[in-house]
Amino acid sequence: MGYTHYWRTHRDFTEEEWFEIRIAAVALFNFVEEPIVAGWNGKGKPEADKDHIAFNGVGDYDSHESMVLTRVRKGKPEWMSQAEYDDHGEFNCCKTAHKPYDKIVVKLLKLVKKIAPYAITLSSDGDVFEDVA
């Protein structure tokens, strides 16, 4: 068990939306007061390219699960019905265990919701998305 944020994508992001999302992600990565984000494995630099955004906390102690957001949905898993996939969207999550990079995960997801409000639905084990429509 751990502290987790969840999102469902209801469609692919448009190229224009993705451009804005990437700009927002890079800004978040660059403007934190101390280094709290690294690459998906806790090492190196976070990624924000034409296909995905991926990051984690820094090092073994402050990393947990990778935050990965993709421009294009991966597709319906075999075990899910098409109707459920169409109705609820594609399920994604990131367990942060309240580690320092958690605040970047939350800020990014809120910005994504603001940029593409109908493409994504957010929820969390905490109350961090209550102010997001």
Image (cartoon, rainbow, N blue to C red):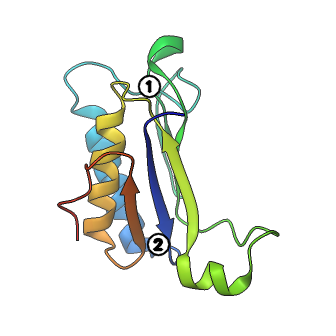
Task: Look at the image and tell me whether residue 51 can be seen.
Answer: no
Quarter of the figure with the N terminus: top right
Give the amino acid type for the residue marked by disc 2 in the picture.
Phe
Mark 2 sits on what residue?
A: 13
Give the amino acid type for the residue marked by disc 1 in the picture.
Gly
Q: Nearer the viewer, residue 89 or 104?
A: 89
Task: Look at the image and tell me whether residue 42 can be seen.
Answer: yes
Front tag of 1 and 2: 1
User: Mark 1 touching mark 2, by CB under 8 A?
Assistant: no
Please, is residue 3 above or below residue 63 in the view?
below
From the top left corner, tell me how far across and down residue 105 is, in percent: 36, 42
Query: Which residue sits at x=34%, y=73%?
Result: 116
SS at badge 1: loop
Please, is residue 131 above or below residue 68 in the view?
below
Mark 1 sits on what residue?
A: 57
Q: Label 2 neighbourhood size at 10 Å, few (<14), some (14-19), many (20+)?
A: many
Q: Nearer the viewer, residue 22 or 124?
A: 124
From the top left corner, tell me how far across and down residue 133 is, in percent: 23, 71
Tell me the quarter of the picture where residue 89 sits: bottom right
Tell me the quarter of the picture where residue 92 sits: bottom right
Sequence order check, earlier mark of 1 and 2: 2
Query: Which residue sits at x=49%, y=23%?
Result: 63
Q: Nearer the viewer, residue 41 or 4?
A: 4
